[in-house]
Image (tube, coloured by chain):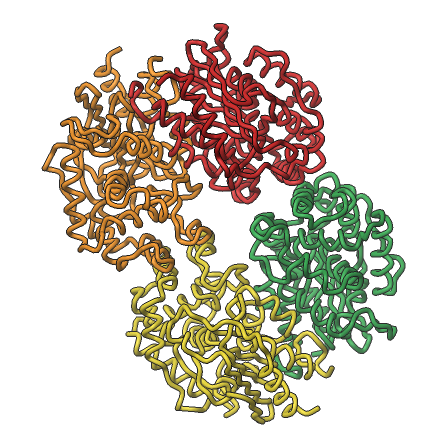
Chain colours: A red, B orange, C yellow, D green
Amino acid sequence: MDLVTIIAEIAAHMGTRDHRGRVANYIPELAKVDPARFGIAVVTVDGRMITAGDADEPFSIQSISKVFALTLALGKVGDQLWDRVGREPSGNAFNSITQLEHEQGIPRNPFINAGAIVVADVNLGGHQPRVAIGEMLRFVRYLAGDDAIAINEAVAASETATGHRNMALAHYMRAFGNVRHPVDLVLGSYFHQCAIEMSCRQLALAGRYLMLDGRHPDGGRVVSPRRARRINALMLTCGHYDASGDFAFRVGIPGKSGVGGGILAIVPGVAAVAVWSPGLNDNGNSYLGTLALEELARRTGWSVFSPPDP
Amino acid sequence: MDLVTIIAEIAAHMGTRDHRGRVANYIPELAKVDPARFGIAVVTVDGRMITAGDADEPFSIQSISKVFALTLALGKVGDQLWDRVGREPSGNAFNSITQLEHEQGIPRNPFINAGAIVVADVNLGGHQPRVAIGEMLRFVRYLAGDDAIAINEAVAASETATGHRNMALAHYMRAFGNVRHPVDLVLGSYFHQCAIEMSCRQLALAGRYLMLDGRHPDGGRVVSPRRARRINALMLTCGHYDASGDFAFRVGIPGKSGVGGGILAIVPGVAAVAVWSPGLNDNGNSYLGTLALEELARRTGWSVFSPPDP
Amino acid sequence: MDLVTIIAEIAAHMGTRDHRGRVANYIPELAKVDPARFGIAVVTVDGRMITAGDADEPFSIQSISKVFALTLALGKVGDQLWDRVGREPSGNAFNSITQLEHEQGIPRNPFINAGAIVVADVNLGGHQPRVAIGEMLRFVRYLAGDDAIAINEAVAASETATGHRNMALAHYMRAFGNVRHPVDLVLGSYFHQCAIEMSCRQLALAGRYLMLDGRHPDGGRVVSPRRARRINALMLTCGHYDASGDFAFRVGIPGKSGVGGGILAIVPGVAAVAVWSPGLNDNGNSYLGTLALEELARRTGWSVFSPPDP
Amino acid sequence: MDLVTIIAEIAAHMGTRDHRGRVANYIPELAKVDPARFGIAVVTVDGRMITAGDADEPFSIQSISKVFALTLALGKVGDQLWDRVGREPSGNAFNSITQLEHEQGIPRNPFINAGAIVVADVNLGGHQPRVAIGEMLRFVRYLAGDDAIAINEAVAASETATGHRNMALAHYMRAFGNVRHPVDLVLGSYFHQCAIEMSCRQLALAGRYLMLDGRHPDGGRVVSPRRARRINALMLTCGHYDASGDFAFRVGIPGKSGVGGGILAIVPGVAAVAVWSPGLNDNGNSYLGTLALEELARRTGWSVFSPPDP
């Protein structure tokens, strides 16, 4: 069966589901999103784009931005980043602070909130937040080849007003010297990064460099092949918080989720996939998005854990 | 450069290393092993076997046996196993008991000791330990195609006499009803399983079914393709205890280590690799074995996180 | 109002209570006890004995035995005991194993199960369990002046068959070398110590030495004044597991509870009190027993935190 | 031997000690204090004041202020306070955040930092920090009968600039709704409260109401007898962070320490004692202060755990 049909059927199946998870309500702006939405976009290595459902509807990418922010930070400081952030799955919720106390202010990986805040601190680099935010936005637009990508200021403001746990994480790490700029500047930048809005189509396009061993489809090199593999590895082991193992088990490809309901998934050498459905499961990952990717992986045979041509 | 040369050079490089980690000393029998040993064996999808160093020297496979025990247990009870064992990286040491208290006696995954003890409890299936041990040994011999594989009774006895932490784990889970046979029978079976001795050559051969999407090279099916992928996924996310993320980051292929110094690594559709060097790093994984696999992955381009033909 | 009336009224009040907590069910023999029972006995510094309710009904003293076992162990090894057991409240449940992992097999205090198992290990002193059990029984009979005190073998056997968490604790500490005899011998001794049966009358009598700065009413010295104070201090800070702070806050006198529903409480220089009611609160302490002691403290003004003559 | 001689000798003994602990350095202003200082003041129930050493030297009372702040907060909201703060020893360091995650933003007791921040939030009561700070200062001056007591603004500013862990705690609890005013206002108030400076003489005088079952020596009632006992109970079980059990064991009277090196200790019905020496032990309590109180308790027989007239 061809990919177009598979994608269409997946979208149809998801539309019939009664249970859709719960929309994140800790950020008031996000709570307003209609839980019935579902979109999917697949861009293949040969440049085909296949979409279904609300694939052109912008949504808040939230933690998916951590992939792009990590890519930028590695470009700035290279492997020195790993002195300040670990590379291990956390075994805790995305906003846990306990681990920081046990490990002296060093977050376990760059995809939990604490780690992403350190990455934002690195990306700030002594500048004002607007400089870092501008750089991030330009980077994402370049990756996706789409200058329409923008930040939803209402979401950013909403997070600033309610993000007490993130403030706690940032202050806590600042006490250990692992956040180096003033906390309000770091979080100002971080909250704006999370408030970037993209459609499934834009997100899949932005993920192509991870499918292509670090190259932009325009031929430019975004990161080295080694770095691209390592980012994919981190997505697989840490991309779904404390459900990363389950995602690897059920879906079998690197992915990064966000509480806005999006997931970016990478099949190296084959495809970049973006799904979106705002209802979340208990671990804070898109409920239907995970199911859709599981069905996609099952029907296509896409998995990094099986022979290349199954 | 051809694979034979790469393997030979890796073995040569490892031989020149001063630092080799520390041999496990908590099992007295294991502490006797010469830290200068290093072996590697690679079996490719087209049946070639390439070895270097002490590739025919038997060593205690220890926790690598958890891969085979998991395969057997899934064959017995299928996905019901996941009611009793999780699929998430633990964020703790291999013998941690803290997590069990927080999660009501359910181990995080089948590759930490607690999880492997539950798997051993499943495999016991109401029989005497010798029955389960016999079944395990026959299974490993079948996978490797080598009836010379045996259990080192002195190592098994050594673990029985000193395995207080494993006894604590087993009693603790029995208090929650997640170990169902008497603890001494379960551990009797578990310690014998860990005391299986194999050479790198035998171990690589035994791992072929995971490279081949679940098929034995003789054409028989060991497990379904889906189950093979899932076992590979668990090896990647949980196979190196609290250094699993780092192994995925640096090496990028599923692997399972044992405190005897062995590592079994799988490149789906390409190769099954076994390395052995008894000195361990701080996380209890083979120090040189990890380095050797990192060099192998770098030089061959083998990684599940890069396009199939890099 | 005189003490006799107060005690009688307290017993009457407790008899009218609907909610009585839940009888411990993890030891099958204990689960058989009638939750409607309530007894109280107060022995004053001038030798008066005042009782009410089921004050002459024997019950399983369980963890209250830890007070007597600690007294014996300090007599054997003195302050060296504190190299193996801490003196801090635990902040965890009575049977928690997490703390042991964080603190290398050293229990936080001698009144949580792990600490009491170390104390039992000390009291075993190279002998068979029956020797240590005999010594403990003689000691308690001497303190109470009553040779009728005995061990309920059915309770001891019941704990031996079901005490998996205690076995886990003991094996875990043995892995750190902090249990030195074989686990089955230590727990054999420990379970028998817990299975001692005493009535409120006997228990209050046995507690007199702690009211009398270490002296037996017969004039003999059980422990030095300093040691008596220190045992009282430990009862206050650690005697009610993770509700010790609450007991100190509400009742204000040193006390030690047991899951059999008994509590021994000491008013230094004034009285020794024993209460018994088998229903437990969520922290594993007698529900009515705690209420009775709170009423007693309120009506008599007994508190170590107020001026001596309130 | 009379009390005057005992106090003088204790001061002399402390002067000869080589090891004096380490002065707190996390608040820069505190790090400037001379570690050679030692003062002690004892005020007895009959009004005698006995001092030795630097008893009239003001020092930063820091966490000792938590006793007075708790007294005020209980006056404002009564036992409703206990819906927001627990009464159990924490089993963790004074600035731990782990416990808050496990217990949904409810601090274990009012004497760890998190609990004291909630108390400060209660005392703020919708007003500006200067109102709450003024009230606190008036209260302490009234208790001590000394209007010279003042706040060291440099210390308060120093804490504001460096108190990242306290900011983390406050934001974390605000995420759970257990801090209700803006974090900067709550901490502004809290840091000023901690920056109150008192001499040993002033501090012992301020503590008299806890010796006198809640009465001020001028005859007024500060708190009810029951509340005074309960505050004393909390000081005993929680007053020295994770060394509270040890302090109860060795000294045997309620006490509250501060990182400025002061300790306020209460012998109900007998004396209020203040000691000061800026060097701290590993638990953050005054090293010489604790030793001095231990010697004082030993030589006077003062202990809440012994008969009133030993």
Q: Determine whether D5 is above or below A303 in the image.
A: below
Image quadrant in which the N terminus of chain B is located: top left
- Horizontal side of C10 relative to D53 (left or right) equals left
- Horizontal side of C35 relative to A299 (left or right) equals right
Give x and y (percent) for residue C98: 46, 54
Counting labels gives 0
Q: As rendered, which of B121 and C212 lies closer to the eye?
A: B121
Give x and y (percent) for residue C301: 69, 81
Which quadrant of the structure image shows residue C186?
bottom left
Which quadrant of the structure image shows residue B24?
top left
Q: As rendered, which of C80 and B5 lies closer to the eye?
A: B5
Q: Is residue C75 visible from the viewing direction of this image?
A: no
Give x and y (percent) for residue C34: 46, 80
- Horizontal side of A146 relative to B281 (left or right) equals right
Give x and y (percent) for residue B136: 18, 43
Q: Determine whether B30 is above or below A5 in the image.
A: below
Q: Residue at x 29, y 53 (%)?
A: B163
Q: Determine whether C89 is above or below C230 in the image.
A: above
- Horizontal side of B265 relative to C147 (left or right) equals left
Image quadrant in which the C terminus of chain B is located: top left
In the picture as drawn, the residue positioned furthest to the top comes out as A219
Q: Is residue C88 visible from the viewing direction of this image?
A: yes
